[in-house]
Image (cartoon, grey):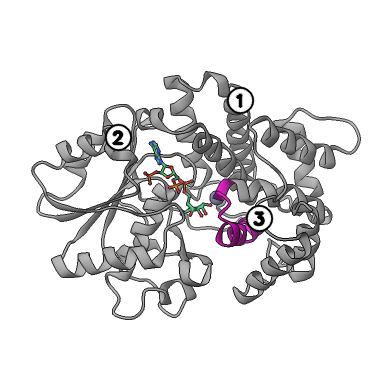
Amino acid sequence: MKFSYVNHTQIHFGQGQIQAIAQAIPADSKVLVIYGGGSIKRNGVYDQVAEALKEHQWTEFSGVEPNPTKETMDKAVALIKEQDLDFILAVGGGSVIDGSKFAAAAAKYEGDSWDIMTGVHQVAEAVPLGVVLTLPATGSESNPAAVVTKAATHDKLPFFADAVQPKFAVLDPDVMKTLPERQLVNGIVDAWVHICEQYLTSPAGAMVQDGYAEALLKNLRVLGGKFDQRDNDEWRANLMWTANQALNGLIGAGVSQDWATHMIGHELTALYGVDHARSLAIVQPSLLRNQMNFKQAKLEQLGRNVFGLSGDDVAEQTIVEMELFYHSLQVATQLTEHQTDKASAIDAIIDQLESHGMVELGENQAITLKESREILEMAVAD
Ligand code: NZQ
Ligand code: ZN
């Protein structure tokens, strides 16, 4: 175990905390409030933000779509440059936050913003950014990652830069009251897979990371099991905090990480518009079976400590339990959204993986295009 760890995002957690942005954003800032398709206008979050910012100078940019695009965010970048704005407040879910991170970095760069995603431009500088989270799922509110799509070419790629990690994040569980069931389920599944991506690798004897990961997985299992009781302050607060902790860097510090499910899942979203979390549930069980040689020991540990399994064949049983968990939330574990035959869909996904350089995925770089194809043979429905 060897690592350097800091998470410098200040969290303001709890009911009524949106007002904390009044102090969290420097008083002399020229603020750009970025949001999505308007859910915040309908649920009172926009009004709370406007009230908190009444002493600040601010303007707004709306219309960030789920799976934010370079094409949309370039318009926000133009506004930031034109009006010399120097603080971004992202109010939304992972898409708004990621799009805001991209804009924050692109506003400090003179070239084509897509250079950030291809690595041509290494981000060292960005407009400072704060977050009001409205959908617990991605952990983007307190991490340095962002995933952005180029609509023109269906490219969905991640980038990572310390400069775009939010300065603060407001996590007020009350904002979840207007979330559609589908998005609440997505939050449970995305957070679940984030933990797995950092846990289901090879045993490293990392007791803190493993133990905390298992505690978070147990939380999600309990919250999923009590989905019918979701209209409840305690349920909301626990999901919001669990999803945040799942991807804030702690459980991944000093241990190997996988992320192959995410990279293959991103292609399903880019090609077929599958919700991010749902793309993961489609890929993950097949990927775990394909990579059983590497993952058996940690699958057994998860099965024993999270699902209470024992006896023979615990690793395979653990994957079955995970499928049952997804199915209990009405989340499918096979792709049915491809509007073509199975073979053509698999070819299209493989082509995209190849063009994005996703040819050696996973903690052992053992998922080449050959393994990805095997995984998709299981994960894509006829
Ligand atoms: O746009 P609005 O009108 O706000 O509606 C959104 C959107 O339609 C709606 N919504 C959000 N908060 C709401 C609400 N509706 C009612 N009440 C509220 N309080 O929910 C819809 C989905 O929002 P979105 O932000 O797209 O969802 P999510 O948070 O799941 O984010 C998904 C994006 O994050 C990326 C994904 O790839 C995807 O692009 N990820 C980012 C990560 C990161 N930065 O660390 C890691 C993740 O693995 C993931 O890849
Ligand atoms: Zn995710």
From where the camera sits, is residue 198 visible? no
Residue 20: mark in rendering = none
Disc 3 vs disc 1: Cβ atoms closer than 8 Å? Answer: no
Q: Main secondary structure of the magenta part?
A: helix
Q: For this view, does 269 lie left or right of residue 281?
A: left
Residue 261: mark in rendering = 3
Q: CA distance from mark 1 to mark 2?
A: 30 Å
158 magenta-colored:
no
Q: CA distance from mark 2 to mark 3?
A: 34 Å
Give the residue displayed 34% in from the left and 63% down from the top. Answer: 73
Q: Secondary structure at mark 2?
A: helix
User: Where does the image place residue 275, in percent across and percent down from the top left?
Assistant: 55, 49
Q: For this view, does 265 lie left or right of residue 49?
A: right
Q: Which residues are magenta?
A: 259-277
Disc with the residue nearer the chain's start (2 vs 3): 2
Give the residue displayed 77% in from the left and 58% down from the top. Answer: 375
Where residue 185 sits, quadrant-wise, is top right
Tell me: residue 71, above or below residue 245.
Answer: below
